[in-house]
Amino acid sequence: MIDNRLSKIMNYEVDDSLNELTDTDILLNFQQAITSLYPHLIPIHAHAYYAWDDIVIPLFYEMIYKTFAYKYGIEIEQNETHAYMFSLRCYEGIHHIECFPKMAPFKGIMNNDYFEVNDEELKGKRLVFKSFGDSVHYLTTGLDTENTDAVNFELVEVDVICSQSNRITDIDGCTSFFIHKDDVEFTFVAETFNKDLQK
């Protein structure tokens, strides 16, 4: 955890068994859960648009942020967290998850095109987790039933932010792009919530 809170009060029950899990383990557990869940949503037409949002956004909060609350012993209210799939104009003053590439250079993916991201391009920038995606299927608008077995959410969508301002910036013209899940580590960033910054 990166602790950017102004007050370090620990006011939440701690589950010591969660110390065996890294922040990356917790995120990848969610990735596996939605990979398993997604095919079951297609027959009931709950796999796209508002239905998908209504399922996955609260599920992310419960499986990720509530787990961090019990792991680190801090209270995490849903309205004080960066919501799954959303970009923010500023990532200061709201709980979020950062992504750290395991090596550089690494491959970024945008519109099914690969591009290389090196240390120089990462200077003064950070990568914030936005969602999991699939390299073959565009899931936001849904998927045909016969393709469900191929969905595995193996990509990580990140927003690029400026380290100093915590605001959206870009790498090679992209303000967000995908990285393969095996190429990044995840770290929870605890912030003191600032509603003025989030307006």
Image: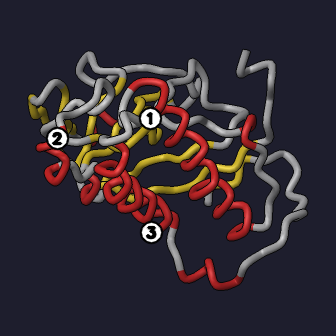
Rate crowding at label 3 as few (under 14), some (14 to 19) or many (20 or more) other CA atoms within 10 Å. Answer: few
Task: Quickly name the residue at label 3.
Answer: 25
The residue closer to the viewer here, 136 or 177, is: 136
Task: Quickly name the residue at label 1.
Answer: 52
Find residue 67 and report its horizontal and vertical position in percent: 64, 63
Rate crowding at label 2 as few (under 14), some (14 to 19) or many (20 or more) other CA atoms within 10 Å. Answer: many
Where 131 falls versus 188 (above or below)?
above
Label 2–label 1 contact, CB within 8 A: no
Where 41 falls versus 161 (above or below)?
below
User: Is residue 162 something that shows in the picture?
Assistant: yes
CA gap, disc 2 and disc 3: 21 Å
Q: Earlier in the sequence, mark 1 or mark 3?
A: 3
Task: Quickly name the residue at label 2.
Answer: 135
Circle 1: element type: helix
Tell me which residue sits at (62%, 48%) in the image.
Answer: 61
Give the side of residue 37 with respect to residue 183, left or right.
Answer: right
Give the side of residue 96 with respect to residue 85, left or right.
Answer: right
Tag 3: amino acid? Asp
Find residue 199 and report its horizontal and vertical position in percent: 73, 15
Q: Quadrant of residue 31?
A: bottom left
